[in-house]
Image (cartoon, rainbow, N blue to C red):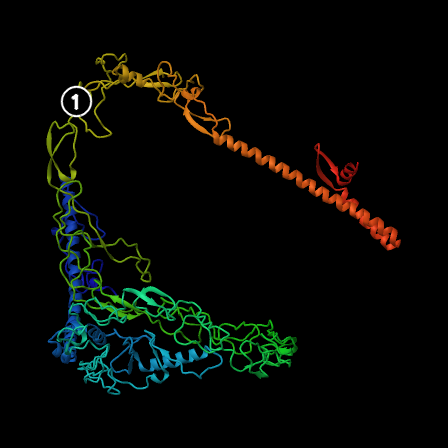
Amino acid sequence: MEPAWRQQGRGRGRGQDAAGERPRPQQKDRPGVSAGRGAKTKTNPSPEPAKAVGEAVQSKFEEIRRSNQAAAKRLVESHVSSSSSDEENDDAGDRQRGKVLESTFTTYTSQTGGDASGLHRTNQYLSDLFQSGALTCLICIASVRRTQQVWSCSGCFTLFHLPCIQKWARDSVFLICSATDEDFGQKQHPWPCPKCRTEYPPSATPNRYLCYCGKLQDPPADPWLVPHSCGAVCQKELRPSCGHACLLLCHPGPCPPCPKMVSVSCLCGQAKPLPRRCSNKAWSCQQPCGKLLACKQHTCSQTCHSECPPCPRVSLQRCVCGKEAAERPCASPRWSCQQVCGARLSCGNHTCEEECHAGACPPCPRSVSRSCPCGKTKSSLPCTEEVPPCGDTCDRRLSCQKHTCSMRCHRGSCETCRQEVEKECRCGRYRRHMACHKEYLCDSKCPRTRNCQRHQCRRKCCPGNCPPCDQICGRTLGCRNHKCPSVCHQGSCYPCPETVEVPCTCGSTVLVVPCGRERSTKPPRCKEPCRSPPSCHHPTREPHRCHPGPCPPCKQLCSLPLPGCSHSCPQPCHDLVLVRSQQVQLAGPWEQPSEPAFVKKALPCPPCQVPIPTSCFGEHEVSPVPCHRQGRFSCKRPCGRPLACENHSCSRECHLVTDGNKCEVCEEGCSKTRPPGCPHHCALPCHPGDCPACSQMIRQRCHCRISTLYLECTKVTSADEQTKMKMGSCNNQCPKELSCGHRCKQVCHPGVCEEKCQQKVKLRCPCKRIKKEVLCSLSAQTVLHCDDVCRDQQRKVSQVKEAEQKAALEEEQKKLQEELEAFEKRQQRGGRRGKRRGRKEEVDDEQERARRWWRRCTAFVLVPLGGAVLSAAAYYLLSQS
């Protein structure tokens, strides 16, 4: 099947018997063009071959342009004729739709005086109803028709097929119930809306097809009424509730704002009532409120409003118990100081342990009849005495709820049950003897498949009630754009709940379709002007309506500046022209062409033929040359341009002066005289103007004879004596040392350094307490002496040292004297006991004490005896002698 433009066009490349083909022009009207496709071109000799070739190219260009324009015009006319019939049908549908909408809004607009600004949302819902394919059931992804039973959500007002929403409700409740093991089917779980997730109880599952207002069951399809409506007044209670009902006819979507006129006062109630719309009846008189705030101390200072805010001021307020007072905001007058009450209770023995509270303290909790820790006996004792344990067995149930506590009546919690029993694991496969308080779980994993029928349970010691699969489904939905976000489940996934906007070419008209149908949905028709930018170089297109596909070809003049000249192209626009493509010869009818027969291609502008006066390279003569062949030439004369030195002229043949091709360079040297005082010669070749300043460098030593300086000849010869002295300095510190040993602080200078050293040195008194900084030149003349404070400090230090030495000596002598006395006593006591007893045990004890005394005496101690180290025994012998 060939395209339309080829069926109705000239049929280039087809046989002569093709229907609708126009006759070809005669060969005499087409000079320079071949008679057939395979014939060779024959041209007559001409004295002007360039002109003949240009005319042949121009005629061929005109012939191709006319044929392409004719084919494109027929294609556009056929497309416009088919679209005009569709537009007429759309206009008729729009007129009928406008009448239905006008009848629906008549009751409302009569109350508002023709103002329909509050009907924008409702008008959008009605427009989607009348537009074919705009409403789609998000569950089955199918269009909602006039004759099908539907249900509308009260939260997002989306339409669904009645069987689809019933199945959705049943499946949602089943999935929620199956998520729990113990209460499956026992609780009444709600089900959500597929789009806005508004929850509905199970009793609200739709089972009847009602109109939008709910008055009529199974409303008939009437072409002069809104689809799925009863045609009566809606009469739903408006939201927010104002006491009035909706005045529109039965309609989809939310009800518009209340249009009634009511007489209401301002927010604060001080101004006189004014007539206003019921939907916008709140207004402010912009006067100060003046009402007494909740703190009963201040008045509201804000402008007219509905409810006064909390008091922003601060006042002195007492806590609940009245002990403390603090500055607090008036908005929170009741506060607690967080202190224990401490008041004496009625028993007179205990105090109230509650925090800051109001009213009387509670009675003493120990004054009532109390029981023993195990609860078997009760006794009424004074609140100052504790109830003693009864002495019987505790017998309270342990945490296992199978055994009782075997301890006597005691306070605190009972011990953990440690009786050994035979326990069965949770899955019932194994048994084991173990402590009663421990739970027995085996390591076997459940091999059963979960409710999704895709994954195994794999839970350790599973009792059989495998939990629902908690993995995400992740399968690609039917839209091929998103993945299923639900928990892993059986069967097919629910359709994608997302919606996609299909805009027209300019984006002004948008069609909302379910996700996945944007590929097969045609763009909506738009009545706005086409906003597509021109595909050619012209700034604007010819005005036409928004349309899908490419725009018609441009018919304006090219007017582009021709390359290489300042003229513009006089031909029609040829940026996108249908040109036959160069196709490869096909092997047979079974082979399909790889490229289209005609492609859009930008043709070049024809060469410019305007004569342009052109001069030679050296501008010695001027001759007329065609614009497309414009170019400068050489007249074979000497150039004669002045050289850069401005003293000679160029002797080359007439040539073009460019960056790479310039006139010759003067090779003679400069012979101009130098300024006075400069012994050097100008190193430049012959040049115009004065010679530049001498830039040669002179080498000399600085004043301190350390650094070598390089100075320009011009600066040295033109400077005065003071400047020369500055130029001869290296600007570093003088390296010479003064007589005092410090380095000279001056910058590199000529002559002898100044002997006055300005560096500061520190002087101290003989005791090193007093210090002072003086100049080095004055240090020999300055002497610091110790004052009375220094002498007092020296005397105190000597006294402290003597006292410490004396105390240490006395302490050491005291310890030695005590040790000696203790030794003598042990010696005397040990001798008497040995003679009196005479028993072997006493002798052994005495010998053990003697050994211990001797080990103690042989320990080394420091004794101030001429600096020698003596043992305690030696010191004892010396002291006895």
> In this view of the protein, which residue sits in the foreground, 811 or 373?
811
The residue nearer to you, when weighing 753 against 108, is 753
Q: Which quadrant holds the C terminus?
A: top right
As helix, strand or loop, the secondary structure at mark 1 comes to loop
On the image, the x and y values in percent for residue 474 come to: 42, 68
Q: Within the image, what quadrant is residue 795 found in?
A: top right
Q: Please tell me how crowded label 1 is: few (under 14), some (14-19), or many (20+) other residues with Cα within 10 Å.
A: some
Q: Foreground residue, 633 or 786?
A: 786
Q: Is residue 716 visible?
A: no
Relative to 266, 680 lies left or right? right
Residue highlighted by disc 1: 642
Residue 383 percent location from the top left of the image: 53, 77
Which amino acid is tagged 1? Pro
Q: Position of residue 731 (x, y in %)?
A: 35, 22
Q: Is residue 553 visible?
A: yes
Q: Residue at x 25, y 57 (%)?
A: 597
The image shows residue 104 at horizontal and vertical percentages of 16, 80
